Amino acid sequence: MKKILLTSVLMALIPITALVQTPPAATQKVPRPGILLLAHGGSLDWNEEVRHVADQVDLQAPTEVAFGMATRSSIQAAIERLASRKVTEIVAVPLFVSSHSSVIESQAYLLGLRTQMPEDLKEFAGMDHGSMTGAMDHGAMQDSAAAAAAMKPITSPVPIRMASALDAHPIVANILMDRAASISHDPAHEVVILVAHGPVPDDDNKLWLDDMGLLADRMRATNRYAAIDCLTPRDNADDLVRDAATAQLRKKVEQVTKDGNTALIVPLLLSYGGIEDGLRKRLDGLSYRMPSQALLPDKRIVNWVIAEEASQSSH
């Protein structure tokens, strides 16, 4: 009887002993990705459009905006704000029309995602800390140190990944189709001309036009316009290149009119904020129609940002 009682007591103690000897499970962090929304920056209205996108995305994931052309101070501050919100990783989403630019390359370098510093970052760094003085006095040395600091990759307490810009995404094609439809009366006798700002280097400009061609292909698949063409005025290029681009644009619109069709100028811009006014000046005296808004405002851009985060996030 005593043997049976002792056995029962020992068996009852086994689970307790096992429980005591088992080390506690390690506490795992719940993934909490944050979004760093990179945007060029512009007029108050332009910036407000971007902030509205950020506010909508923020309902899904912590989101902070960094304005500027690869502006280190703005990027660093946005990362620190995300870190204070306890994110476990950051996905940088460039809210730019194209990935093919030294701005995007410079942003990637500052985020520690590119080893070679783009040459244009020196110019962007000057925009970050202010214009430099020419004389090598104490102030000049301070400016030099500030410029060097503005070109130094940022620090982040959490991993950072980077998505692509809008490029030839189907959402962009869908928005452009709607912008064209808003000014269309007779598609069979209308020619859509997609017009983007365009970069300075010729090789980058070709990549812009390649992506715009893909967007045009998507639009042709579901529309009956007489034609869909693409052009880049290249506003920041030298006079010779810019004037040639203007002549090409005017010649295209003139030919459309001569053929008995109507030109629908559809700007491939994130938001209106000044570039469209320059476009109108280039087209002065010609017959055409242009929509009242660019890609923004549009809920689909919010959806694109969320989808880009999801495609890059580790969760």
Image (tube, rainbow, N blue to C red):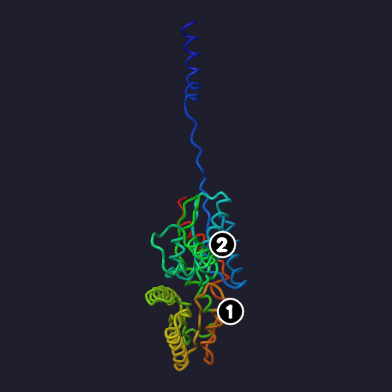
The residue under the point 55% across, 51% down is: 83
Residue 18 x, y percent position in the rendering:
47, 23
Relative to the observer, which residue lies in front, 235 or 217? 235
Q: What residue type is labelled 1?
A: Ser
| Furthest residue in direction front, as rendered | 137
Q: In terms of secondary structure, where does tag 1 sit?
A: loop
Residue 197 x, y percent position in the rendering:
48, 77
Q: Dot 1 surroundings within 10 Å: few (below 14), some, or many (20 or more)?
A: few
Residue under label 1, please give it: 292
| Furthest residue in direction top, as rendered | 1
The residue under the point 43% across, 74% down is: 215
Q: Residue 65 carries which label?
A: 2
Q: Which amino acid does label 2 sit on?
A: Val
Residue 239 x, y percent position in the rendering:
45, 85
Q: In this view, does 284 lie above or below 129?
A: below
Q: Can residue 168 be seen in this view?
A: no
Q: Please state which of the two labelled residues, at mark 2 or mark 1, is closer to the viewer.
A: 2
